[in-house]
Amino acid sequence: MLSVGYLDGVGDRDISSWRSALQRAPILIVSGVYAALLIRSPSQLNEVIDVESERPWHLLFSAFGLLAVIAILQIAVLGRQKLMPIRDAFLVNLPSLLLACIVIRSSPLVSLVGVAVSLLLTWFVIRSETRGALVLFRPALLVWLIAYASVIASTVIWPVFFPRILGSLGVLALGLGLASIGCMILALRPLLGALVAAIALSMAVWATRLHEVALVDPAVDAAGTNATNNHPLYSSLNAWLDARGDLPDYKAAQRPYPVIIASTEGGGMAAAAHAFLALNALQMHCPNFSQHVFTLVGVSGGSMGNSLFSGSITGKGENGRLQPCRARSDNLPTDILTADHLSPVLAALFFVDMINAIVPGQPFAHDRADVLIQSISESTEQERIFFSQPHASTWSPDSAVPSLTYVATDTHRGSRFVFTPFSLEFPFAMEEFPSGAISSTKDVTIGSAAATSARFPWITPTAFIRLAEDQVRVLADGGYFENSGADTAIDFIASIKAIIKQANELSADSQLEDVDPKKCPIIVEPVFSKMVNWEGCSKHIFFGYVPISSWSGQDPGAAYEAIPTAKQSFLFDPIRTMLQTRSARGDHALYRATKEFCGIDALCVQGQTTDTGIYHQTLPFVDLKLPLGWMLAPSTVQKIAYSVARGQDCSYLAEKLGHGSPDHVAGSSDGDVSDTAPTQDQVEQSARSGNGCSADMMFELFNPTGDPKAFSIDGWGP
């Protein structure tokens, strides 16, 4: 027969065992994060490892060193009850062991030393505690409080500088480690811990947290008065054309003036780098390129790349007479793209946004989207000044810097929201700011507009913007609506064509806001190669479209490979569908854009000409395993730079200029098509050659006289 005392002992042991498991659960959760990184091996993590492998001492002290300190503090907290020496030594060092497995291929010595030092230190602390030589709970609690407060203060005061010192792996170690210690301390008092957890969860789920976009006054013009942030489309295009320094060259050659619209797709820092490098490559080839670009349409990461490009040429781009295109070197500016923007975002997540989410009153004004744009804009002093300028009112028709159009998504209506300097008379199902149906006398900075376009929830929070006293919007990443930017670019062109058509059909005495009398029409020409009669003050234009994307040129919906089986999941199928639709929607938009320009031959598979009007610049994101995060290794940036437009790599140009034919011919295959997958080198070379030929066709737009020796081709294919 069992005694009551025996039963009481069993109950006490059960409670003790339950509390022991609860206290160690946070360490297991942190270890689960590192295990998931090891198993999944995301491409962004590989970028971080590539960078850290070049600075082993930083990896040792920042990542492994911080994990060792966290392990010692965890042992001190566990020692408040009863330590299990061997098990706890292994448990607190499990994150270090998993991190070592992650980085051991690139940094084997650092991995072994880091884990060994951490194990020795924690074992020494455990032995000292079990023998009663050390009682570390109170000192550990004090150290934890001071460390947490110091890290939060440093992140708020130096939101970019401080996280970059730690690095992404260091921020991850601190963020997860300090949070786990806090949970372990609360687990010592389960009822208090449950109450704190319930309050934090309710604040995170139900409390309103406004990530508000600050509105600013319009830019001040030379006269000291506020410049307008309302630029009617027709008059803006008219003024822009009149101000083109090379317009007389096209008029003399009797060719239409090329008006270029470019779009850049979303995809984190890789998309930003692709946009920035492709635009710079085209500019290096053709000095007049930027002054022909009426607007750059950007989505998410592409918006960042567009902004960096425009900022880099501000004050440098010359709106002058026509200069011939030429070969370029491979010396594209890449330093601006290799800065660490991931660490500041992670630090803001752990030490700013998480505090804001669970503490009443939202103590910190800035969020991780603000920190991201601050990190990117501080690449150079010139970029910092440019990103802080009011967006719409900064655009000038006299400038050689293109206007910037940013695409976001209205989270409440699922519709497209566009930051643009122009008032689109035919907006094609998009809401514009600040000159849309709800016009505003205020503006947003270029940095705020770019960051709003790149607010992918969970990674960065949505944005709250007040258009008017009774009109607010909550905006997310533009990729939710359409990730390529092609839909917005084509709608932009369609809006211009519609208002031109309406203006040209008016009688001379008709009155319509923003429309000049019929005496000086703008005429859209369907082809560039045919001569036109520039009589009177009429202006003849030809639209060129440059989509900068990851599109492969494949027909959306077609089956290009066998799919013998597929997984189904009650939980993950809806999420997978939404994420895959985000990418597929962009492919459909690019297909639609190509069809708009190519007609029946939707993919231009039989060859293209300059008159087609569409000049793709593509990058195989999936094949090159490019990350969607905000940090790129220098080797990855060089890989992207290698693939963007380099005109002299096109075989058709080489044949035209009598330089011989490069090994790879765009638009053709060398013999039979192999069943084996192409190597990464072949993928890169194919992209490089194809982009070069596409660029060379666009370069013909800068050869209005038809010079047979010009650095351009008028088409490729049969």
Image (cartoon, rainbow, N blue to C red):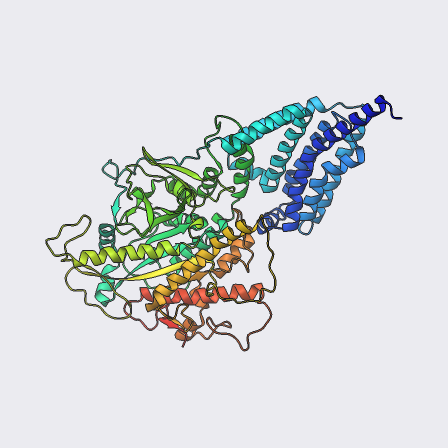
Q: Quadrant of residue 11?
A: top right
* Residue 129 rendering spot, x and y as whole percentages: 78, 26
Question: Can the viewer see residue 494 in this picture?
Answer: yes
Total number of numbered labels? 0
Residue furthest to the right: 1
* Residue 493 rendering spot, x and y as whole percentages: 31, 57
- Give me the residue at 50% from left, 35% from top: 159
Question: Can the viewer see residue 110 in this picture?
Answer: no
* Quarter of the rendering occupied by the N terminus: top right
Locate residue 430 relative to residue 108 in the image: left or right: left
* Residue 78 rendering spot, x and y as whole percentages: 73, 29
* Quarter of the rendering occupied by the C terminus: bottom left
| Depth order, front residue of 86/157 | 86
| Depth order, front residue of 86/72 | 86
* Residue 393 rendering spot, x and y as whole percentages: 29, 42
Q: Quadrant of residue 503?
A: bottom left
Locate residue 16 relative to residue 340 in the image: left or right: right
- Give me the residue at 62% from left, 48% from top: 49
Locate residue 17 relative to residue 325 in the image: left or right: right
- Give me the residue at 37% from left, 71% from top: 715
Residue furthest to the front: 1
